[in-house]
Amino acid sequence: MTTLSAERKALLAARKWKERAETHERQRREPIAIIGMACRFPGGQDTDAFWQMICAGSDMVREVPADRWDVDAFFDSNPEAPGKMTTRYGAFLDQIDGFDAGFFQISPREASRMDPQQRLLLEVAVEAVCDAGLVRKRLLRTRTGVFMGMMYDDYARMQSEDPARIDAYTASGVGGSFLSGRLSHLLGLMGPSLTLDTACSSSLVAAHLACQSIRAGDCEAALVGGVSLMLQPQTTISLSKIGAQSPDGRIKAFDAAANGYVRGEGCGVVVLKSLSRALEEGDRVLAVLRGTASNHDGPSGGVTVPSGKAQEAVLRHALEAAGVEPTEVGYLEAHGTGTPLGDPIEMGAIGRVYGANRATDDALCVGSVKANIGHLESAAGMASLTKGILILRNGKIPPQINFDVPSPKIDWRPPIRVSTSLAELPRGKEQGVVAVSSFGLSGSNAHLLLGAAPTPVDV
């Protein structure tokens, strides 16, 4: 019987460790497939309607409807007026009370205690699962993760105003963890399940963490999304006090007349798998996440003041993770809130990263869907991601509305442009790459790189 020498054993062990390291590196850099999506955005009750709306250059901002709050009672153009807001506008969904409790096997009493954000997320998430062609029975007891962004708890405040209304279903109805936990329970999912609040970047940070979880093997698939509804006036009042709200109700991203943002509401959900798994299981791939990154502003001019250096760093990190050169990106969906402070800082970071070494006739096109549907806060990243996926699939860049005079506070010398008409997405050797940014009011940033779905030749 032949025995292996010590030298041979060491060689085999070294080879095994090398193979493991190579496998780990491949998993760390493997693209993540987006195999399903669904949404409810102002003017877009599904992805097709949403795409048609933004391509038409529609503006879905309107006066606050009476079923939310009495705008006359809370409006005052004077920002110093106590208890008043400086805007009359927002971008709202219709009929947020049309939840079909029976379909989800939830009693009417329990449903009445559930935050409408929970109800809306359940509806959109199930639609995303169906769009992905997944059978709910086959998801049962799988290591499928749920990563959701949510920021505000208006419904909890509404119930706590009258302690007599509090019952056994109140805690599970308004607790943030139940936004994700109830969805995992409904579908019988056994992967990680968490609700994130990093303010305006919540849903893109959720996407970043979901990609990491899939690559690490913590889950085999993931539902990722964000939801935001405006049920009470308090948050709008607070944002008016810091000068963030546009008095005229228009988000004029990158424009000389930019004077703040308008709040919006909605929900978006995507279904993710590793690309190799998606192809092996015959899934339709809508697009791929080539690379993602997240960081925090750290020391800056204030906890709500964005940091250009941190934004530049997160952009570069995402590009490195994706293995993509800045010049390969044809479109960037910016955070673009239309504030006189935030837009110049963001565009400065974009110019330093994406404008360097770029030919004048190859200008990067930048836009922001917030001009169409308002700032969806914890769901804003999903609106931007949905737009990016649709841009890749259709090869078109929707027009940027409310952009007339380029802001003099922005350095336009790097080859960056804003398109005010429907334009073609530049497609180079990588068949088009789209970048998406989302920056949180409390300093958490996220950036990701989207690539086109692989063709049969690529496979």
Image (cartoon, grey):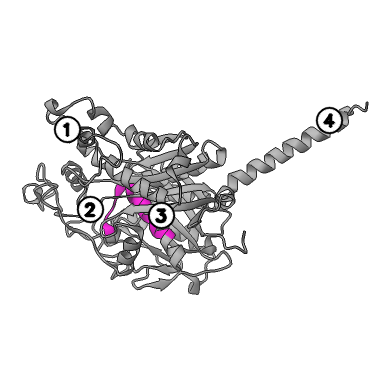
Toward the viewer: 330 or 92? 92
User: Would you name the residue on which mark 3 appears?
Assistant: 385
Mark 1 neighbour density, 10 Å: few (under 14) some (14–19) many (20 or more): some
**The N terminus sits in image quarter:** top right
Residue 233 higher or lower than 454, as above or below: above
- Of callouts 2 and 3, which one flags the residue occurring earlier in the amino acid sequence? 2
Q: Give, as a three-letter code, the residue at label 4.
A: Lys
- Of callouts 1 and 3, which one flags the residue occurring earlier in the amino acid sequence? 1
User: Would you name the residue on which mark 2 appears?
Assistant: 93
Who's the residue at 36% across and 68% down the image?
398
Q: Give, as a three-letter code, the residue at label 3.
A: Leu
User: Would you name the residue on which mark 1 appears?
Assistant: 159
- Of callouts 1 and 4, which one flags the residue occurring earlier in the amino acid sequence? 4
Q: What is the spatial separation of the Cα atoms under label 1 and label 4, in whole angstroms? A: 67 Å
Q: Residue furthest left?
A: 73
Q: Give, as a three-letter code, the residue at label 2.
A: Leu
Q: Give the percent coordinates (x, y) of residue 276.
A: 59, 50
Query: Label for residue 9?
Result: 4
Q: What is the spatial separation of the Cα atoms under label 1 and label 2, in whole angstroms? A: 22 Å
Q: Give the percent coordinates (x, y) of residue 306.
A: 36, 48
Does 388 lie within the magenta span? yes
Q: Is residue 128 left or right of residue 5?
A: left
